[in-house]
């Protein structure tokens, strides 16, 4: 490609291009426009075909769906029968011609139907059969229209009108009696809608479905219903300035926030009166025939809107009343302005400010607010991370002013191992900006730092004086390669330079990220950013970002107490950091190897060390066994913090789905849930966001017929590669076909040149991998296909490299990444504007994952997602039937979140960790010595300072288990603690340590996933 960048494609150019791609793939699947074929059409086309009917299989069962012999339309007639309507039937056939195949001309018949009674009727059999004979010259082809009347919903009659391929399966000389390019349309029938059962019966949703397709999609146009081979659906780009409000500039909110905030609140209030008033709801109720229940639900939602409005108004009032809070808020805006430089925005979206205002109360009145989990919910890509950061930076600045000079303010957890490096960078950038502001304003306390606490081998737990395991950093030998493996920042959070070097400071025993830019404003040698677990406990960075699985560490690592309460002291050697319980290798509790310094006192009141916030990203993923196990560890952290500091932290969360969050939050956190923002009174209108007219993502559902999903994916990927590459080889012709100026070709290639194939199972991903290796997916003209993989198995460092290549593509197309195969790992936090084409192999298990995964494309420019349904599966088949509703309202599709806190099997796995954590974080510091050995525990127990009965009560209190409500769980705990006591007082000779006595604690919260099935039976 020449280096001429051309001119940038507009949204309308992009949409035209996507339409062109979609049409091209549809043609490839159906064969329109192909007149002859050297290969068997049955092994080539996956759309539009109808197999000859075998036996009595009508087509709706599993086998019938895989290769149907019929397509049809289900309708609810508005009147009582008999009914008349008009059908139009079209199809073609393929005829063998020597070693070649030739396509017949089209059969196109209009047939009038008179439908009576409840029995099956057949129409047009002779006409269709004769027409087939005429276009093919062969006997053996035949087809008919088959109509059935059955009782539909609420007993009203339902019509099923199908075209059925009744051809002989093995006719003389006829190699293939399938019909191709088949379609059916019906007009002239007045119908009532079906009500979609998968959506809750709520006043907000339009649940009407005017017609269902059988083995196909349906479009309707002025009373005519037509079958389609694919089902299209669109998601419009949300308009975050829903009410036409201007953005709220960081700069303005820093200098003089009140005029803007007052007008925001005023606008919200008047909108609310308009949308939620009794008279407005009454009008809506009358217009849309709400039931009494729906009207009552609307009234309750109106009340909740009132609460939201109050909270936001109170937020402004708090700012007026509390000078420190106002200062923190203003300076936060300065920090956000700094952190956003070069990112293309300089203001907040109104809902972000709304969320921050609504939650300012929890900065001022943490205790009252800690009983509620506040959940941010909105379409992905809306700036969720920045919303958190706005609140957190206000909180950290306020903390410094109220005397919290050290320690962790927030621990942010992502549910998967693969917290993305992009997200991490955003946290680090924001904290760096806040630190610069803190210095400018001469606000006291320690440096704002961030820490990265993740499980597995993504970051080291500790750095040993001599390497013990493969891959350990060898500090003796300036081991640059292993050091570089732990580089987690892609650029300097202070100056944006990409020159970052890893170094190990032997003096302070610290693994440093260093910025090499000589003009960097950060004056210190190392960036305030920690990736080694032990460093996080030693320095307690202001914000800890990590993965949830790490929480289990508290059952093994006493220093994790720093994430729930105060450390024990501070080493007197500057730069060594906080100290914890002593061990033989650290006599005074300092983690720097060989440090013999005594520990000094803590630099601030111990109770201030408790984190103010725990954040949970992607809350909806905490389900099944992961959710059940986490619930126990959440309870543990809450309980420890309450004992050590006297309060529980506030919990903030984000979720992609709303269905069932109340129960989920209750189970996980023993708190009430509250969602922000409230949705408007219908899905189209809202104060904070409303749908724009701009297409964000176009979805195409495909149910392959007769060929395997693997084959279809191979063909589609190849076809797409060829399509985008033609922008390179033949830009003039392609742009003319697309209908855009040829100067747009480089820009379109840039935006659509990388495709994502999303697999839900490792098996799917492996199959795609094999196809690439064996050349099943291969661009024309022997060009190279650069392929990368983003799954949970991809090494962290490789992920960073791939993301970097995607963000900053090579100048030559041939060098770029062309194809990415990805698993759910990429559905969290991978924000790349260049990913705009996705093929999804089968539907993910939950609608949340569908929303999250497909949100990776079309972030800034229109994107397209081809969803290949595994149509043999019931769930895929059912979603295919109402695919457009699934896309537009998927966050409300009914899918209860299976989660329980009260599983005996889970308790059996978590209890050792829960009790060992209490020994490490409460009893050891209290005893002032190591309680590692069982003999030490015995001595303590004999002295009366360690009472097993009280331990059991404490754990029951954490978990909210009572003998009255949960007798079986209480019994299990009693048995466990009895055995534990036996093991301490009269231990078997093999029992040496406390953890021998308790049993192995969990190493990671994910351990449990493969091992413990969760049963939702509370009585178990
Ligand atoms: Zn720098
Ligand atoms: Zn020390």
Image (tube, rainbow, N blue to C red):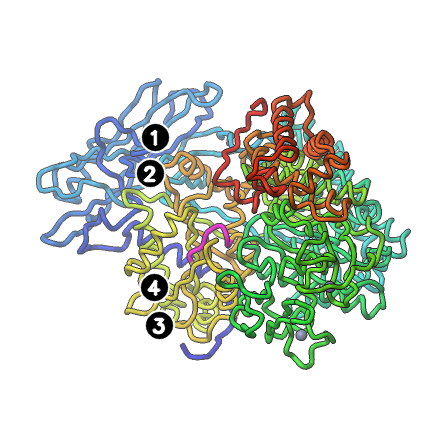
Q: Residue at x 54, y 41 (%)?
A: 890
Q: Earlier in the sequence, mark 4 or mark 2?
A: 2
User: Given contact means CB atoms under 8 Å apart, are the residues at marks 2 and 1 in contact?
Assistant: yes
Image: 260 above or below 743: above
Q: Residue at x 76, y 41 (%)?
A: 272
Write down the residue under mark 2: 184
Label 3 element class: helix
3D distance between C-alphas at marks 4 and 2: 32 Å
- What's the magenta region? 821-826
Residue 894 picture quarter:
top right
Q: Which mark is residue 161?
A: 1
- Label 4 lies in ligand 1 vicinity (Cβ under 8 Å): no
Write down the residue under mark 3: 729
3D distance between C-alphas at marks 2 and 1: 9 Å
Residue 636 picture quarter:
top right
Q: Earlier in the sequence, mark 1 or mark 3?
A: 1
Write down the residue under mark 4: 722
Label 1 element class: strand
3D distance between C-alphas at marks 4 and 3: 10 Å
Q: Position of residue 478 (x, y in %)?
A: 56, 74
Image: 121 above or below 812: above
Label 2 element class: strand
Q: How many residues crowd around disc 2 within 10 Å: few (fewer than 14), some, or many (20 or more)? A: many
């Amino acid at each position: 490609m020449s280096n001429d960048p051309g001119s940038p494609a507009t949204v309308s150019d992009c949409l035209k291009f996507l339409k062109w791609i979609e049409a091209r793939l549809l043609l490839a699947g159906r064969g329109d426009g192909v007149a002859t074929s050297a290969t068997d059409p049955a092994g080539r086309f996956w759309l539009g075909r109808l197999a000859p009917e075998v036996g009595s299989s009508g087509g709706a069962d599993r086998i019938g769906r895989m290769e149907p012999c019929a397509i049809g339309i289900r309708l609810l007639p508005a009147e009582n029968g008999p009914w008349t309507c008009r059908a139009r039937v079209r199809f073609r056939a393929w005829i063998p011609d020597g070693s070649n195949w030739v396509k017949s001309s089209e059969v196109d018949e209009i047939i009038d139907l008179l439908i009576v009674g409840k029995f099956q009727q057949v129409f047009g059999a002779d006409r269709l059969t004769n027409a087939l004979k005429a276009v093919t010259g062969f006997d053996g082809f035949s087809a008919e229209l088959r109509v059935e009347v059955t009782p539909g919903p609420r007993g009203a009659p339902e019509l099923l009108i199908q075209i059925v391929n009744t051809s002989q399966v093995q006719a003389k000389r006829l190699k293939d009696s399938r019909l191709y390019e088949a379609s059916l349309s019906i007009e002239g029938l007045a119908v009532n809608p079906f009500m979609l059962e998968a959506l809750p019966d709520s006043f907000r949703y339009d649940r009407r479905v005017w017609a269902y397709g059988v083995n196909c999609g349906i479009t309707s146009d002025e009373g005519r219903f037509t079958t389609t081979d694919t089902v299209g659906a669109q998601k419009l780009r949300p308009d975050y300035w829903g009410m036409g409000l201007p953005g709220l500039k960081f700069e303005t909110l820093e200098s003089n926030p009140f005029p803007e905030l007052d007008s925001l609140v005023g606008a919200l209030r008047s909108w609310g009166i308009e949308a939620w008033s009794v008279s407005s709801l009454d009008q809506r109720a009358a217009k849309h025939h709400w039931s009494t229940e729906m009207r009552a639900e609307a009234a309750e939602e109106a009340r909740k809107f009132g609460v939201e409005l109050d909270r936001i108004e109170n937020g402004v009032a708090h700012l007026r009343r509390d000078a420190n809070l106002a200062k923190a808020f203003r300076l936060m805006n300065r920090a956000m302005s700094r952190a956003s430089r070069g990112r293309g925005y300089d203001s907040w979206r109104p809902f972000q400010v709304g969320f921050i205002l609504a939650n300012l109360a929890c900065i001022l009145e943490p205790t009252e607010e800690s009983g509620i989990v506040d959940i941010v919910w909105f379409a992905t890509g809306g700036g969720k991370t920045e919303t958190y950061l706005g609140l957190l930076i206000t909180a950290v600045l306020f903390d410094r002013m109220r005397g919290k000079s050290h320690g962790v303010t927030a621990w942010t957890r992502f549910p998967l191992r693969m917290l993305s490096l992009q997200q991490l960078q955003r946290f680090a950038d924001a904290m760096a900006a806040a630190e610069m502001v803190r210095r400018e304003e001469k606000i006291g306390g320690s440096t704002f730092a961030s820490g990265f606490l993740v499980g597995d081998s993504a970051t080291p737990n500790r750095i040993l004086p001599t390497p013990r395991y493969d891959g350990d950093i060898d500090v003796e030998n300036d081991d640059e390669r292993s050091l570089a493996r732990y580089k987690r920042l892609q650029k300097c959070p202070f100056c944006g330079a990409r020159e970052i070097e890893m170094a190990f400071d032997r003096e302070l025993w610290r693994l440093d990220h260093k910025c090499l830019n000589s003009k960097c404003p950060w004056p210190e040698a190392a960036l305030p950013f920690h990736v080694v677990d032990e460093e996080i406990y030693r320095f307690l960075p202001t914000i800890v970002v990590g993965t949830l699985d790490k929480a289990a560490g508290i059952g093994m690592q006493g220093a994790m107490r720093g994430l729930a309460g105060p450390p024990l002291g501070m080493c007197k050697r500057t730069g060594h950091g906080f100290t914890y319980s002593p061990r033989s290798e650290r006599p005074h509790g300092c983690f720097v190897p060989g440090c013999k310094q005594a520990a000094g006192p803590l630099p601030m009141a111990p109770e201030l060390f408790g984190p103010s916030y725990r954040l949970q990203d992607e809350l909806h993923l905490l389900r099944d066994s992961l959710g059940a196990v986490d619930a126990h560890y959440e309870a543990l952290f809450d309980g420890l913090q309450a004992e050590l500091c006297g309060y529980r932290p506030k919990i903030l969360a984000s979720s992609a789905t709303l269905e069932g969050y109340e129960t989920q939050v209750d189970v996980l956190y023993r708190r009430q849930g509250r969602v922000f923002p409230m949705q408007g009174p219908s899905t189209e209108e809202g104060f904070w966001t409303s749908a724009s007219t701009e297409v964000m993502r176009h979805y195409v559902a495909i149910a392959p017929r007769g060929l395997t999903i693997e084959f279809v994916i191979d063909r589609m990927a190849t076809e797409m590669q060829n399509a985008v590459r033609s922008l390179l080889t033949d830009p003039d012709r392609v742009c003319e076909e697309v209908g855009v100026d040829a100067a747009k070709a480089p820009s379109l290639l840039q935006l659509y040149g990388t495709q994502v194939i999303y697999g839900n199972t490792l098996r799917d991903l492996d199959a795609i991998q094999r196809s690439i290796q064996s050349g099943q997916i291969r661009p024309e003209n022997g060009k190279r296909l650069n392929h990368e993989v983003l799954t949970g198995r991809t090494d962290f460092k490789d992920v960073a490299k791939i993301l970097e290549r995607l963000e900053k593509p090579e100048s030559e197309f041939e060098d770029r990444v062309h194809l990415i195969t990805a698993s759910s790992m990429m559905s969290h936090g991978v924000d790349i504007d260049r990913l705009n084409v996705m093929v999804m192999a089968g539907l993910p298990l939950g609608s949340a994952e569908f929303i999250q995964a497909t949100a990776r494309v079309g972030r800034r420019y229109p994107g397209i997602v081809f969803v290949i349904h595994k149509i043999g599966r019931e769930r895929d088949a059912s979603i295919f039937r109402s695919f457009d509703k699934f896309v537009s309202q998927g966050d409300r599709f009914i899918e209860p979140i299976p989660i329980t806190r009260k599983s005996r099997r889970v308790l059996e796995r978590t209890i050792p960790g829960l009790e060992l954590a209490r020994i490490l974080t409460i009893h050891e510091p209290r005893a002032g010595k190591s309680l590692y050995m069982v003999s030490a525990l015995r001595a303590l127990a004999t002295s009366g300072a360690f009472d097993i009965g009280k331990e059991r009560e404490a754990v029951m209190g954490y978990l909210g288990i009572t003998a009255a409500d949960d007798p079986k769980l209480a019994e299990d705990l009693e048995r466990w603690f009895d055995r534990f006591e036996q093991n301490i007082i009269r231990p078997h000779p093999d029992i040496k340590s406390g953890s021998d006595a308790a049993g192995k604690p969990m190493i990671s919260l994910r351990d449990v996933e493969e091992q413990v099935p969760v049963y939702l039976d509370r009585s178990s």
